[in-house]
Amino acid sequence: MAWDIRGKTVFLTGASRGIGFEASVALARLGAQVVMVGRDPGRTEAARAEVTARSGSKEVSHLLCDFSSQASIRRLADAVRARFDRLEVLVNNAGGVHKARRVTVDGIESTFAVNHLGYFLLTNLVLDLLVRSAPARVVSVASVGHRRASLDFDDLGFERGGYGTLRAYMRSKLANVLFAAELARRLAGTGVTSNSVHPGSVDTHIWSGAPLWAQPIILLLYRPFFISAEEGAARIVQLVASPELEGVTGRYFEEGKPVAPSSLAADEALAKCLWETSAAMVGLEPAQGRAYAT
């Protein structure tokens, strides 16, 4: 049967505002069972209520998670298992930027921890549920900014200096593209696809975390190319809902089309190294999920 989003369980992280919120509205209107994941209890509940009102759907719920905490991510995965016996779509979207370098409760540079390791850990912890629910899809929200990034495995967290808001953000987005491609390779034959997407340059709250001096620069460089949150969300919804993308996996999308990522993002050896490094950073063992098996 052709892919039909109606009735499918769709998890979206970073869903309380911005493109995650607008994607929740659109998917609820299409008939999906939408589960919105946010950090702030009041904001996430208010967002859920608004999605319900705007979509007219009664199949909208929410869960809470602080993606800067691995313990919180593990609690989220436990809640998913307790409440749902199927999971057809996971949209990894939660993210942020910071004015200055900071570390999480787990001792990891925050941008990399939230924007990449959050995707990596949650996906692995619910992976068997996705496989059992196949056909299923994992969509990881990345950025065209990955094209200007590099990885230094000896200093992923900028401990030796050189931290910059955009530099850290772009590094995390390169990690997103590498992760999505490596996940696709490891899930070959399972019926679960994995793709990454640049939703466009969206003027959302995420840039409020940039230093004050950098915000005018960001606006100057990107405002001519900004699109609305609804337009950005539509590019995510395409990867979630389009029957034409059934079976398409391991691709990176810009402006609704699969395109070649940067040469670094296409490096399979680099992707494997990132996977193994990430697994060590979040404490995953080889037995915890098919995708971790080498």
Image: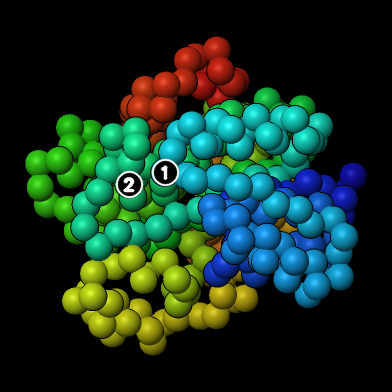
Left or right side of 231 for 52: right
Q: Secondary structure at mark 1?
A: loop
Q: Position of residue 215 (x, y in %)?
A: 27, 77
Q: CA distance from mark 2 to mark 1?
A: 7 Å
Within-10-Å neighbours for mark 2: few <14, some 14–19, many 20+: many
Question: Going by the image, does 75 lie left or right of 61?
Answer: left
- 227 is higher (above) or lower (below) than 184: below
Q: Earlier in the sequence, mark 2 or mark 1?
A: 1
Percent of width and height locating residue 40:
55, 56
CB under 8 Å between callouts 2 and 1? yes
Q: Please count the marks in the image.
A: 2
| Amino acid type at image mark 1 | Ser
207 left or right of 121 in image: left
User: For the point 23% across and 69% down, which residue is it?
Assistant: 211
Image location (x, y in percent) of residue 226: 45, 81
Q: Name the amino acid, label 2.
A: Ser
- The secondary structure type at the circle numbered 2 is helix
Q: Residues within 10 Å of mark 1 (few under 14, many from 20)?
A: many
Indicate which disc residue 68 carries. Answer: 1
Specify whether residue 147 is in view: no
Which residue corresponds to the image point at 35% horizontal and 27% vertical from the top-left? 281
Q: Residue at x 52, y 37 (%)?
A: 72
Q: Which residue is mark 2?
A: 110
Q: Tell me if residue 100 comes above or below residue 136 in the rendering.
A: below
Q: Nearer the viewer, residue 123 or 43?
A: 43
